[in-house]
Amino acid sequence: MTTPQNTPPAYGLTTEQVQKLQEQYGKNELTPRKKQSFLRKALHIICEPIFLLLLIAATIYFILGEPRDGAIMLVFVIGVIGIDVTQEWKTDRTLNALKNLSAPRIQVIRDGRQEEIESADLVPGDIMRIAEGMKVPADGKILEANDLCIDESSLTGENEGVWKAAAGKAEPSSDYWRKDTCYAGTFVLKGSAVVQVEKIGAATEYGKIGANVASAPESRTPLQKQTDSLVKTCSIIAIALFVLVCVFTYLNLPDHAFPERITESVLSGITLAMAMIPEEFPVILAVFLSMGAWRLAKRNSLVRRLPSVETLGAVSVLCVDKTGTITRNQMSVQDIWAPDGDTQTLLETMGLACETNAYDPMEKAMVACCEANGIGKGHLFSGTLIREYAFTNELKMMGHVWRHDGEVLIATKGGPEKILDLCELSETERQITEHRILEMSSQGLRVIAVGLEKPVDEDAIPAAITDCKLTFCGLVGLCDPPRESMKEDISRCTKAGIRVVMITGDNGITASAIAKQIGMPNADRIMTGEELDSMSDEELRRRVRDVSIFSRVIPEHKMRIVKALKDNGEIVAMTGDGVNDAPALKYADIGIAMGKRGSEVSREAADLILMDDDFTTIVDTVRDGRRIYDNIRKAVGYVFTIHIPIAFSALLAPFLHINPADLFLLPLHVVLLELIIDPTCSIVLERQPAERNIMVRKPRKPNEKLLTPNLLWKSVLQGIAVFAASFTTYFSFLQQAPYNAPLARAMGLSIVIIANLFLVLVNSSSYDFAYASICRLAKDNVMWATLLGTFAMLFLILYTPLCGILKFAPLTMGQFFLAIGIAAGSVLWYEIVKFHSHATAKHKNSN
Ligand code: ADP
Ligand code: MG
């Protein structure tokens, strides 16, 4: 692959060149995104057992010599397929949109301008800028390198970071993996670089390894697995009952001729089988989860893996970084203290120990403080920086070596215990200092100690910061106030049975003071990183039950904390932003990365990306997770309920010696009902707002089944009630006028359809009464549409020529209102149950 050499790198490619190259090389993707064709999707749905059943039924109609019935059946089948395909299409679109939102982006120079594009749009020849925490998106030659260290373990298996240099500056070597090239799929551990892309997509070294690393297949979610097995169980029962009904109907028809006798009985059996297979479940899941994820994305929380939506509602422990998530990450210097009163030296040394181009909010605050005290940046950084002792999470301190007016200065700052260890202090000096540290940190201030060394010359500069012999300059106390909403969020979590655990590199007393300010329970249960290191896994497991703060930890500790919590059976959500946080984020049930300040590596390991880095969003997301799960439950219960009248009437017919032609529900009518059930469910129930008590109850138990015995009971009872009401009405009409099966059926079916609406109202909340749902409904256009849609459909099938075709007879006004009344009665009794449970709940509360 050749790359255009004629354009100077600083200018990058031109728009035309990019276009041409894009046509030539395509997208920078390992495996091209596949698009499923509409036809394939339809075919996929037709192969589901339920549709095979429908097709068999249609065929039988044709065999029976009733092509009109067969044709109607086919039309309905197409309708149902249409609904399913649209829903799947919508789901796919939603998921793709989500994927695009979280797609990695990269800085490039094109047309001489710097811009940010999706990594997938890179072309060979592009000039890109990579930096710490990023995943390299393509293979390329390094033009400029700045302290660049790359983790190439995904390619080479070597765990050590590789130091890179710009082309021409690297030592020549014959290694296959070049030092002046960076490779797609590797991580930038440190530094930054400007890189000219050479190879993209499958042509990269990473791409060559094979598609196996490219994309893990989307595995089925725990809920999907549960519903899969539910569908399977129901299908097996359906087949058994199918045979049973076939045999009984056959025995019931001694006066029918041979082929008809068989086809009629098969038809009855199919009606039952169709009613028994809950094929809606997978659709419900897909729609509810993807729509849920979509709604979350609109509220700043990006779900990267769909199963996380299910898990969210079960979260029992939130492990949160203090700085930036709990606090605002807006620091300011609140207090300074120099033991000898020389605050000038203290401030100057502090300033010198900061980056000249401060990025860290704490360092920004320090430099600002210097400026406020008359020590301008120009004066401060007028010397030459000759050496840096880099900050590491383990050391928690850093230093800069400056040459200023012929003098060499080592300015250091960091965690007091670390800096003080390098200072020579008398016993009393040390005691006074410790007292001040305690004083500052108990106010929730982050305390930084500052130390200075003046070596005689450059040769006397120690090799490591730990070898310095410092003079203690003093202490600086920085305030990083907690986010305003923290107090309320913590109390929401506490009420919802969710424990919040604070994780910080800061000192325990500081963290504890902040925890107290925001009302965290157990704010004085602190464990330090050192204690954690000295503990066995078992001991840690015991201790994490009530520890609220982990202080002075390094990212590597997070893994052990998550593991201990998970071993205790907790469902753990954990935040992280750094490269080193990635393993813990992966291991946690819900890994949460920060969209703003997080590294790409952490985002890639996470299940959830928090676009606004705000703790409130985490709590809202958990709440929404609970809501979505609730709604899935409601939908599943509803589907059960509505299938019961269908199944029972098919089951009962042969025993009541009802002539197959006079059946309550012919296969035709079952499909008609399906046409109503699916949309009601996925539109109305999906949108249900959260229950009032959603954040007052304990998290769901992770091993709890979707279909709890309680839910099953409720659904079955409601279903039986609707069945009893509709079937009894049908049967009594059938007895009154034996030759008017269409009228009986119209009555029965109207009752089922209207009852369906009432069911949605009653079951949209387990606590609020139906009238509350009606009040909500009044404000919601979609609910109105559903309501009107249902009545329009009833009107169509009762009072247009469709009526006869569908084997109905029109109802009189009186009969219609009777149907409404019976339907209402068959469902609204459940309100009394709710009332009763309200009363007992109140009774319990007052005790
Ligand atoms: P947190 O987990 O709260 O973000 P950090 O890991 O950023 O904490 O910092 C932990 C500790 O390391 C701080 O309390 C401070 O003592 C020290 N520290 C952090 N950043 C710097 C810095 N730029 N210079 C010196 N010390 C620092
Ligand atoms: Mg920090």
Image: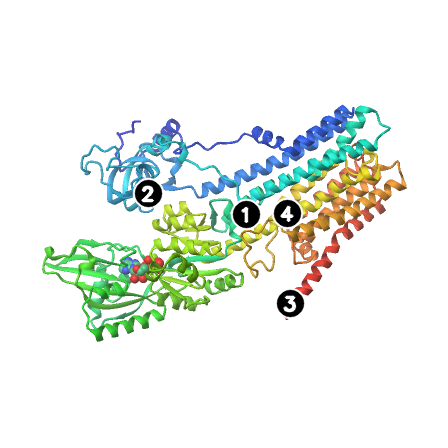
Q: Nearer the viewer, residue 673 or 428?
A: 428
Precedes in sequence: disc 1 or disc 4: 1
Three-letter residue code for mark 2: Phe
Three-letter residue code for mark 1: Gly
Mark 4: secondary structure = helix
- Check the picture and name the quadrant holding the N terminus: top left
Q: Which residue is mark 3?
A: 844
| Residue 180 image position (x, y, % from top left) | 24, 37
Three-letter residue code for mark 3: Lys
Instruction: State the residue at coordinates (38%, 42%).
Output: 105
Q: Count the marks: how many?
A: 4
| Nearer mark to the viewer, of 2 and 3 | 3
Find the distance from the CA under tag 4 to the CA under tag 3: 29 Å
Quadrant in the rendering for residue 690: bottom right
Find the distance from the CA under tag 1 to the CA under tag 4: 14 Å
| Nearer mark to the viewer, of 4 and 3 | 3
Three-letter residue code for mark 4: Ala
Q: Which residue is mark 1?
A: 292
Marker disc for residue 615: none
Marker disc for residue 187: 2
| Nearer mark to the viewer, of 1 and 4 | 4
Above or below, comparing residue 44 to residue 391 in the picture: above
State the scheme by which the image is colored: rainbow
Mark 3: secondary structure = helix
